[in-house]
Image (spheres, helix red, strand yellow):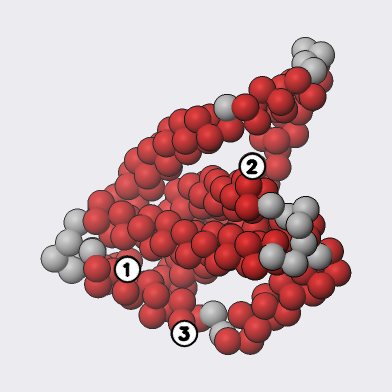
Amino acid sequence: MKGLIQKDFYVMRERIRPLNYVLIALVVLGVLIYFQAVGAMYVALFLPLLLVGIPKTIMVYDTQCKWDKLAIALPTTRKTIVTSRYLFFMLITVVMSTMSFGLCVIVGLFFKELTLVLCVKFSLAGFTLALFYGFLTIPTGYALGVNGGSLAMIFSVMLVLAVAYVLKQFNVDLESLALWLANYAIIIGIVVLAIVGTISYKLSVHFYTKTYS
């Protein structure tokens, strides 16, 4: 397990060039300078989501170099291989969410309106969005190959539009709904992520085992 996770970090180091990190840092700096306190909220919300595509990049690379055909010959199970990918993804998400939270707190030292509570809320929201997107892209990647990530994004957008359409058709008071969700955001987030994560993991194991049986 440890070796599989280390392998993903090695691939990330080789595939993601330093220039990419420099460009991301410049974008973050530009957002903070231009939007100031609000920019820190944007960074806390979207930075984890921006970099959660790294596992998908590694999956594409593994497919191109036929790594998985070699991996199944190792003294490990297919379930362990999939588990290592999820652990790597969650490590990346935790690290990026922690960094974005730290940036938000630092910026908050210069802007009184950016409180610690806001930093926590936006960082948790970014962490949740990143996990949700990852839980979609990993199984679709195993099921559909290199096009899985794009299809997952399309599905996510369609799902949001479908929910909005249904709510509109039933004349749901969106303001009241948003207030109710805010009051129970942590509980709802934990429950939804637990359900989606479990389904995602089981689907990934199924698709991976089916593909490399």
Question: Label 1 sits on what residue type?
Answer: Ile
User: Which mark sits nearer the N-terminus, 3 or 1?
Assistant: 1
Q: Nearer the viewer, residue 47 or 72?
A: 47
- In screen coordinates, is 125 left or right of 88? right
User: Which mark sits nearer the N-terminus, 2 or 3?
Assistant: 3
Q: Which residue is drawn at the image coordinates 73% and 55% (left, top)?
A: 114
CA gap, disc 3 to disc 1?
15 Å
Q: Which mark is residue 170?
A: none
Residue 86 percent across, percent down from the top left: 38, 55
For the residues carrying marks 1 and 2, which lies nearer the camera in this image?
1
User: Which mark sits nearer the N-terminus, 1 or 2?
Assistant: 1
Question: Label 2 sits on what residue type?
Answer: Phe
Residue 93 percent across, percent down from the top left: 49, 59
Q: Residue furthest top?
A: 170
Element at label 2:
helix
Residue 65 percent across, percent down from the top left: 40, 76
Say which residue label 3 marks. 14
Element at label 1:
helix
**Mark 3 and 1 residues: CB-CB less than 8 Å, in contact?**
no
Q: Which mark is residue 5?
A: 1
Q: In this view, does 176 lie above or below 4?
A: above
Which corner quadrant of the image does residue 174 belong to? top right
Residue 80 percent across, percent down from the top left: 24, 56
Residue 126 seen in render: no
Question: Label 3 sits on what residue type?
Answer: Glu
**Mark 1 and 2 residues: CB-CB less than 8 Å, in contact?**
no
Residue 94 seen in render: yes
Say which residue label 2 marks. 155
* Labels in figure, total: 3
